[in-house]
């Protein structure tokens, strides 16, 4: 992989990471604000189970989104480390080059398509 390509992927990864960090911050802010407002409303009005359920559902959804984004940030950080170590773009299993088209779609990819398909099949068998 050329230095120009590495710089391109590094920039994409950094931009995606910044976007995810911002999204997590907004989720936290929105969830905390909703929790404070909800707590205030429950003190002022009678408790209604539907309102409490909706609030809990929204908090749970925000938690899952933040958790997903945090995992993605981890994978992006790992990809950035591979760039700095000179290992980016090589499959961690078979050591073959990862197709640049795959990296365009999934810039944090650590496996080539063949190895990823094998991993997915193995994981699918474990869950069934």
Image: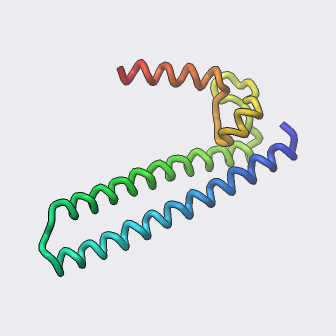
80 with respect to 23 (left or right): right
State the residue lying farthest toward the bottom.
44
Q: Is residue 67 above or below residue 96?
A: below
Is 28 in front, or is 80? 28
- Which corner quadrant holds the C terminus? top left
Q: Residue at x 30, y 75 (%)?
A: 36
Query: Number of callouts in the render?
Result: 0
Vertical relation: 127 (above or below) 101: above
The quadrant in which residue 118 appears is: top right
Seen from the viewer's position, the closer of residues 112 and 36 is 36
Q: Residue at x 64, y 20 (%)?
A: 114
Q: Residue 30, position in %: x, y?
A: 42, 68
Left or right: 88 in relation to 26: right
> Residue at 61% across / 22% down in the picture?
115
Q: Nearer the viewer, residue 6 or 52?
A: 52
Picture coordinates of residue 37, whole percent (x, y): 30, 76
How did the renderer colour the structure? Answer: rainbow
In the image as oriented, which residue stretches furthest toward the left?
46
Q: At 71% from the left edge and 25% from the top edge, which residue is drawn? A: 95
Q: Quadrant of the N terminus?
A: top right
Q: Quadrant of residue 58?
A: bottom left
Q: Residue 57 in the image: state x and y as whole percent.
A: 29, 55
In the image, residue 110 above or below residue 22: above
């Amino acid at each position: 992989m050329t230095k120009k390509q590495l710089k391109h992927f590094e920039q994409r990864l950094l931009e995606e990471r910044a976007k995810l960090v911002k999204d997590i911050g907004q989720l936290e802010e929105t969830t905390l604000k909703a929790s404070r407002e909800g707590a205030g409303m429950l003190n002022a009005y009678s408790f209604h189970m539907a309102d409490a359920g909706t609030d809990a559902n929204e908090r749970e959804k925000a938690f899952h989104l933040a958790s997903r984004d945090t995992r993605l940030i981890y994978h992006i950080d790992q990809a950035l480390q591979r760039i700095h170590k000179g290992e980016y773009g090589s499959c961690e299993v078979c050591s073959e080059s990862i197709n640049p088209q795959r990296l365009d779609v999934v810039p944090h990819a650590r496996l080539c398509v063949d190895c990823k398909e094998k991993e997915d099949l193995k994981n699918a068998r474990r869950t069934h």
